Amino acid sequence: MSMYPRFRGRPMRPSEGMLRAAAGLFRLHGRWGELLPLERVLCAVFFKEPDRVPVTHFLLGAARRLTGISYQEFSRDPEAAAEAYLAANEIIGGDVLYTVIDLSVEAADFGQEVVYPDHSTAHPDYSRPRIADVEDYERLEPFDPRRSPRMGMCIRMGELLSRKARLRYPVIGFVFGPLGVLAMMRGAQRLFVDCLRYPEKVKAALEVVTEVLVDYARALCDVGVDSVMLDTLFASQSGVSRAMWVEMEGVYARRIAEEVRRRGALVSLHNCGTRPYLDLQLEYLQPHLVSLADLPDDCSSLQELKEKYGRKTAIAGMIPTDSLLLETPREIMERARLQMRALAPGGGYVLAPGCEYPPNGDLVNALALVKAAEIYGRYQRRKG
């Protein structure tokens, strides 16, 4: 939970056993009354049925519209971004706060030129890659993410959200995986070829990137976030093979996850790839929560996903982002209802989009997700 007491500058966190016991108490409370978002999410993470299914709309840049700031302000100003996220939960609803801004954050601090559009997500300048040829892999150098412009912003944002959320909302820090950071500086297709043709050069860069990301995750934990979410996009059929992911990211991302656990925070994952390798990600990273956009490569239905993995990790996501852009609120609520029917029993589920809410999409469908959780996501209560 946020606002931990501190000892020598570091948060003093409850153990996992204490959190599990607290989740059991919150479950009992939820059978009689309303839980706080933090209590609700903690129940889900430890497979307890709360009062209702937790929900997050994962607004990200779309949240800026609720406070009237520009996309550039959202992308560069931690105070403005934090206020936008808080406004999103206060106005639309939602049970989680994040520090994620966009996927170019880490690459920008390694020297990648970034484009900041007026009305859309910041992204690398693809015409000016930081890693222009294979020799550039070995030219990356480590640095302190606390003193870097964009990661430093997200660390500051984590501090602000943790302070303002207090005991109400859980705050999840966000770190793009090592292979994803390289893809932002090289381009995914060229990176994949380099992994085959020049694996040692890529691994030299991965060592440097991982060193910085471990320190970044450590800094997020130290400002009080409750969990750190690693984005392991390429652990999927839209990324690299299973064996290559283990070699080129799994063993590196594991170091980040281990540091998060050492700091006493919970590990989360996000993977919006097609047919993700969930079994491998669980093996290497041992997350408490996994956000997905598609069924794992070894599952054919939501029911099979629940049966195979529903007691190994809490599951979030699975509402398609294109549906949020194209479907009506009534259709979104029906989609959410069917998904909750499959994934919610026994806890271990958070209703959410599979990835970032469409930045310029109508916010009424974000409200529809929250309403679906409130109407259709109720667990059985005791009669007074």
Image (cartoon, helix red, strand yellow):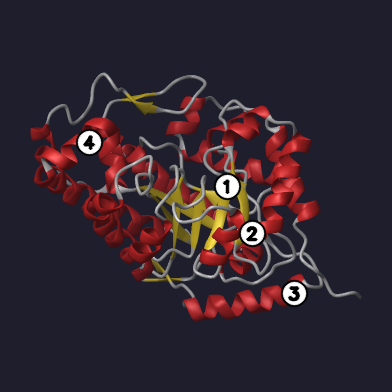
Image position, residue 197 (x, y; %): 12, 39
Image position, residue 62 (x, y; %): 58, 32
Q: Nearer the viewer, mark 3 or mark 1?
A: 1
Q: Quadrant of residue 75?
A: top left
Asked if the residue under mark 1 is in contact with the one under mark 3, i.e. CB atoms within 8 Å, the reply is no
Question: Is 142 on the left-hand or right-hand side of 237?
Answer: left
Q: Which residue is mark 1?
A: 318
Image position, residue 7 (x, y; %): 40, 73
Give the Cα distance between marks 3 and 4: 50 Å
Asked if the residue under mark 2 is in contact with the one under mark 1, i.e. CB atoms within 8 Å, the reply is yes
Mark 4, secondary structure of its residue: helix
N-term mark: 3 or 1? 3
The residue carrying pointer 4 sits among few (fewer than 14), some (14 to 19) or many (20 or more) residues within 10 Å by Cα, namely many
The residue carrying pointer 2 sits among few (fewer than 14), some (14 to 19) or many (20 or more) residues within 10 Å by Cα, namely many
Mark 2, secondary structure of its residue: helix
Q: Which residue is mark 4?
A: 191
